[in-house]
Image: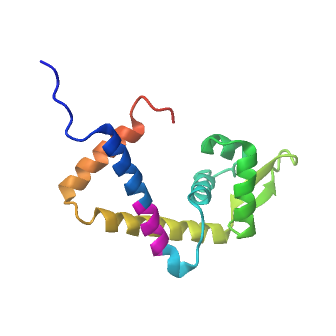
Amino acid sequence: MPSPEPTVSTSNLAEQLVRLTRRMHRAQKHHLEHLDIAFTPAQSRLLRIVDHYRDTPPRMADLAERLEVVPRAVTTLVDALEANGAVRRVPDPANRRVVRIELTDTGRSTLRALRSARRAAAEEILAPLTADQREILGGLLSTLVDGPGVPH
């Protein structure tokens, strides 16, 4: 017996995911307005990645690989974040020709504000869901994010 047709089309789900992502970005931006923080999603992601390297600050090449972009794109992002005082370029102590990127105190406080705004935006968006629905949604999202079929 053939499986039943899904009640929601894949294209409709795709559109809903895009709309939800946009809504999340708008809500996060709203929660940051009073802080006068204006970072792009790509800059925010770069800050999170730099913070991930706790022991040794990453090289530009490490960042390009993690962001899956060409090194020139990372240079542009780092330039903007450096101009805002969020990161700084530092020479590698083992090889002075290698430049590493580290968070500044401003970058760390900006990252805390970004995370707080993201949590507040998520709370706002998830407010209509019950605890059980949030649990189910979390499991579904984990399956989609971590599942097979899409290169990371």
* Residue 128 on the magenta span: no
Can residue 122 be seen in this snapshot?
Answer: yes
Q: Locate residue 41: give its quadrant.
A: bottom right
Q: Residue at x 69, y 56 (%)?
A: 77
Where in the figure is residue 98, as x and y percent of width and height?
Answer: 82, 46
Q: Quadrant of residue 82?
A: bottom right
Range drawn in magenta: 23-31
Residue 64, horizontal then vertical, whole percent: 68, 44
Judge left or right: residue 30 versus residue 51: left
Can see residue 59?
Answer: no
Question: Which color scheme does this rendered protein use?
Answer: rainbow
> Which residue lies most toward the bottom here?
34
> Percent position (x, y) of residue 131?
20, 58
Q: Please state which of residues 6 and 33 is positioned toward the viewer in this rendering.
A: 6
Apparent side of residue 7 relative to residue 144 in the rendered image (left or right): left
Most common SS among magenta residues: helix
Seen at 65% across and 72% down, the residue is 106
- Who's the residue at 87% across and 48% down the image? 96
